[in-house]
Image (spheres, rainbow, N blue to C red):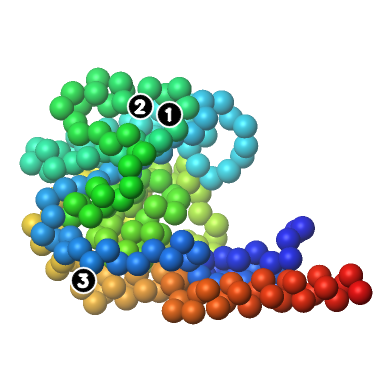
Amino acid sequence: KISDFFLSWGWSTPNEPKVVPVGQLKSERPLGVQHSKQDGILLVTYTGPRHSYFMYSAAVSSQWLSYFDDQCVFVDCLPSHLRDALTVRLHRDDHGWSQRKRWQDRFPSIRLDDGKSNAINVRRSRLYVSSYNATTYLESFTMNVPTVIYWNPNHWELRASAIPFYEELKRVGIFHETPASAAQHVAEIWDDVDQWWDSSEVQKVLEQFKKKYSHLPSNLVDCVDGILRKIITSSDSSIK
């Protein structure tokens, strides 16, 4: 309400002229990697503060324990050769949850990433798995990394306007509401990820989703420049 403009990654809101859909401001681009030739799976995980301090659509406070159990279900449901290919990327902020110890207690031989490195594990991955609703999979979509996402819909609630887009992601196997369903899909597509990810049906749904929530225009800098100049011009006029 106090902003001049709110720059979104593609979405807009009726009767809210301050929301300007300029596109994805991080400008992620395809990595130039043939992911089907890679042999890893990267599971990206989440933590939050141990005590509730803010109401929002995420696993809050002790709900994280249920979230962690879901991650263990995902790993348990993978065939053994895919568990061997898995790297779990921990959230860089532990918040006192002892993520590493919990994972090692449940799966002593699992490969863990401390969450502080760059995207090198994405380059080495055949599949990118996101377990919570955040920008991670928006970036992997625009980098054209084969991606599977899942979360408990009772923790990460969606606004009504977004539900049809996620239903389409669900229809083509990208979005899942249970870890078991996600693991089953990973096992089904593993031997030929390209046949699934590059299919016309999946790519059409991805393009529709990206246009709405992770648009990547060729003139992004010009769009942002125009908005900033408009604000400056308006400010100068009001001062006079």
Identity, as a three-letter code, of the amino acid under mark 2: Gln
Query: Hey, which quadrant is residue 65 in on the image?
Result: top left
Q: Is residue 169 above or below residue 17?
A: above
Mark 3 or 2: in front is 2
Residue 42 position (above or below residue 214): above
Q: Are marks 3 and 1 in contact (CB under 8 Å)?
A: no
> Nearer the N terminus, badge 3 or badge 1?
1
Q: Residue at x 45, y 22 (%)?
A: 96
What residue did someone put label 3 on? 198
**Dividing the image into 4 quarters, which one contains the N terminus?**
bottom right
Q: Nearer the viewer, residue 5 or 232?
A: 232
Eye-nearest disc, 3 or 1: 1
Give the labeled residue for mark 2.
99
Q: Write down the residue under mark 1.
A: 94
- Disc 3 element: loop
* Residue lying at 35% horizontally and 67% vertically, measured from the top left: 29
| 191 lies left or right of 25 | left
Answer with mark 2 or mark 1, whichever residue precedes in sequence.
Answer: 1
**Are the residues flagged by discs 2 and 1 in contact, CB closer than 8 Å?**
yes
User: Residue 122, can we see it?
Assistant: yes
Instruction: Find the distance from the CA under tag 3 to the CA under tag 1.
Output: 36 Å
Residue ID at (12%, 38%): 84
Q: Residues within 10 Å of mark 3 (few under 14, many from 20)?
A: few
Q: Is residue 72 left or right of residue 162?
A: left
Identify the residue shown where x is 46% and y is 61%: 26
- Near-viewer residue (43 or 71): 43
Is 167 in front, or is 11?
Answer: 11
Left or right of 161 on screen, residue 235: right
Residue 5, position as x, y percentages in the image: 69, 67
240 to the left or right of 164: right
Task: Tell me residue 82's x, y (percent).
Answer: 12, 43
Label 2 residue SS: helix
